[in-house]
Image (cartoon, rainbow, N blue to C red):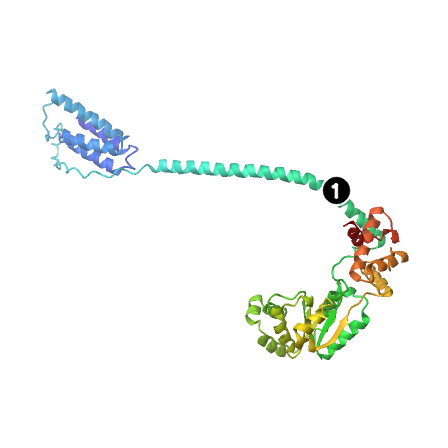
Amino acid sequence: MRKIIVLGLLIAIGWHAPGFGEQPTAQKYFDQATTQYLVGDLKAALNSVDRALEISRNFRGARKLKDSILREMKLREMGLVPRAAGTPIKMPPIEVAPPATREVQPPAAPAASPKPAPTNWLVWTGFILGLAFILFSGIFLAVFVRRLLIQEAENKAGEEEAGGLKVLKAISEDQRLWYQKMGWHNNPFTLDVHPELLTGYEKEVKEVLGKVNSHSGHILITGPLGIGKTTLLRWLAGKLPKADYHTVYIPRPPIEFNQLVAHIFQSLGYSYEQAKKESDLYNLGQLRKKMKKYLVLLLDEAHEFTIEIERPLRTLGDIDGVNLVMAGLPETLDKLRNEIQPLYERLVLKITLDHLEFEEFKELIKVRVESVGGRGSRPFTAAALEKIFEISRGNPRQAIKLCDNAVSEAIEQCVEIIGPELIKDTERESADVD
């Protein structure tokens, strides 16, 4: 009876052992060893319990059962336990009823050696978490150090920039106050192209408009740098009636002619992909007929025409309803005459923009000043205007640059009148230094 109670406790311990849920094979050998122990087959029971312990060393029930088996085997060797192997343990009689006969199954044949149990998932989880912790710690440290270095660099740059910003803010404030005294809302003497401020060249403008309206042929405008060719082309793009003309301004000749045609298609509302697909002269000719408008192409920097686009450009000029207005440096005329003779022969107007006269120059300054809210040519004195005209020789771009430099000098010296002493030919001075 005592042994049965002990076995029951061992089974209970084995059932609740930590390895039970995780090691079903060890439990199987433990159950098998228990059965063999009950029928007295101590060697088989010892073998089974050893197998269970091989699988799960922490199996407490199996350890206790093994101790019981070894103790009984020792007693049996000493002759104190006469029970032979295979003899079942006799159960004490129960007074109420005779004990039920219980047929004990013979011990099962030893199973094949099981595969080693996989490493506990908790170990692997801990290992992976450890690696992840090390990895993220390294990343965090690297980011932290990098951030410190960036912060240090930003602080250093900020200190340098702070000094620059102070100077810049001081200059900007001086400019704002000076402009306010003049009644200006910004600087009128920038080199940005302002087609609406086109001044001078009234005769040339009338000639260009006359030929464009007559649709008689192509136009070539030449002149030196800064004379106003681009301003004139941009002025035409904004002034020609939209109901009758579709104007396309091309600031510089493309490398490939198809790029020029694609740009024209895009100006007509085609997407980039559609323009690339449709970009050939045949499609452009068909489209020009459908649109029922004259197509005016304003080609700037014509002196940069390459051989790759010269011939197709001639064909483009032959399309009915397409007019070319080209602008370039003085050598453009000889370039067309020598390299694109058919296009040169279709020129109906060749004009050259020359330097402004003094009255036209004064009008240019007046228009610029009044465009930003000023009055007349204030703050320039008559002597200052004469000196600007003398240095610039009536070139609009040069005159605007001289005016801009003079305004900067006036702001720096805190004067509200710009006389000839503030007009400096910086380009000539730099050339003398060189």
Measuring from the top left, give residue 429's x and y in whole percent: 80, 51
The residue depicted at 74 percent of the width and 42 percent of the height is: 166
Between 328 and 101, the one lying in front of the other is: 328
Height in image: 55 above or below 369? above
Splitting the image into 4 quarters, where does residue 304 fall?
Answer: bottom right
Horizontally, residue 353 falls left or right of residue 15, namely right
Horizontally, residue 107 falls left or right of residue 205, namely left
The residue under label 1 is which amino acid type?
Answer: Lys
Measuring from the top left, give residue 263's x and y in whole percent: 62, 68
Between 217 and 109, the one lying in front of the other is: 217
Between 99 and 285, the one lying in front of the other is: 285
The answer to whether residue 63 of the structure is visible from this angle is yes
The residue depicted at 61 percent of the width and 77 percent of the height is: 285
Height in image: 289 above or below 186? below
Splitting the image into 4 quarters, where does residue 250 fall?
Answer: bottom right
Horizontally, residue 131 falls left or right of residue 66, namely right
The answer to whether residue 294 of the structure is visible from this angle is no
The residue depicted at 85 percent of the width and 51 percent of the height is: 422
Query: According to the image, label 1 marks what residue?
Result: 166
